[in-house]
Amino acid sequence: MPEPDRFPAIHDLGLCAKLVTFADGLSEAANRAALALRAAVEAEGWTGVEETSISLASTVIRFDPLALPHAELEARLAALLAGRDWYAAPLPTGRTLWRIPVALGGAHGPQWEEAASLAGRDPEAARAEILSSRTRVLTLGFAPGQPYMGELPPNWDIPRMTELNPQVPGASLVVAIRQLIIFAGPAPTGWRHIGQTAFQCFRPGAAAPIALAPGDEVTWREVSAEELAEIQAEDRSGDGGATREALP
C-alpha cells in the first residue's frame, strides 16, 4: 500500500528527466496513479516537456532544462501532486480493451502445468483463472512494445525460474509474479512459457508500430493448436485474431 510519508516522491533522473514514484513496489493503486499523472502532465502541455512514460509504479517526464528549468518543473509537479488523490484517480480515457486468442499448454505452453502447480491449481482450474482474467497493460519494456500485464490473483505470485528458458518464440505468453507478458520477439527468459498467441506487439513499418499502450486491458479467448495455426497463416494485420473495443 502507498506510504503517505514517503510517496509520491519526485527525483531527478539524470540531467533531463524527473521521476515521480508512487510506491516501492507494484500495486494497482500505484500503477493507476502513474497512468493518471502521465495523462495529466500530457494534458497540461507544458513547454519544454518532450516525452512522458511510465514504469510499474512511476511516471517519467523527460524535458529540456533550457526551456523548463529543473526547479520550475519540480514546483509544477509538486503542485499537481498536491491537488488530488492520485491513487484513487480515474484511469485515463482513450484506452483499448483487447481480446486475444491464445493456445494454452501442450507444445505451445510447455511449462503450463508447472506454472499451474506453483499457483496452487490443477491445469483446468488454472485455465479457468487465466481465461477469466482481465489484466491491465501496466507498462512496456524489455523489448519494443512488450507489455507487462497484471495483476493476476495472489496465488499467481509465482517466482521467476532459477534458470533461463534458452528461448521462447515471439508472441509467446509467459507468467511470473502475478503478471503476464506477450513476447515481442524470440528471446531467453526466466518466466514460464504457458501459451502461444499470434499477436504482434511490435510492428515495424506500421503507422502505429507499438500495438498496446499502458492502461489498455487484455482478456483471452482460448483456441486450439489448429485454430492458432490458421490465424498465424492468415493474419496480415498483426492483431493475431484479436478483437478490440474502446474503453470509456
Image (cartoon, helix red, strand yellow):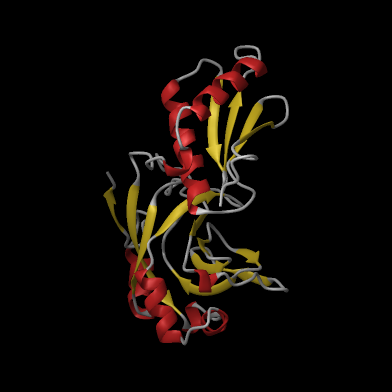
Q: In this view, does 108 lie to the left or right of 232?
A: right
* Residue 233, horizontal then vertical, whole percent: 36, 67
* Residue 121, horizontal then vertical, whole percent: 48, 84
- Picture layout, residue 59 above or below residue 185: above
* Residue 109, horizontal then vertical, whole percent: 50, 78
**Where is residue 239, by image quadrant?**
bottom left
- Picture layout, residue 222 above or below residue 30: below
Q: Can residue 219 be seen in this view?
A: yes
Q: Residue at x 41, y 40 (%)?
A: 89
* Residue 101, horizontal then vertical, whole percent: 35, 67
- Picture layout, residue 109 above or below residue 148: below
**Quadrant that contains the C terminus:** top left
Give the camera-side residue of 87 and 52: 87
Give the camera-side residue of 30 and 18: 30
> Given the current orientation, which residue lies at the most extreme top position?
67
Q: Count of labels shown?
A: 0
Give the camera-side residue of 106 and 159: 159
Q: Residue at x 53, y 22 (%)?
A: 79
Q: Residue at x 38, y 39 (%)?
A: 92
**Where is residue 7, by image quadrant?**
top right
- Picture layout, residue 11 above or below residue 148: above
Give the camera-side residue of 195 and 68: 68
Q: Can residue 238 be seen in this view?
A: no
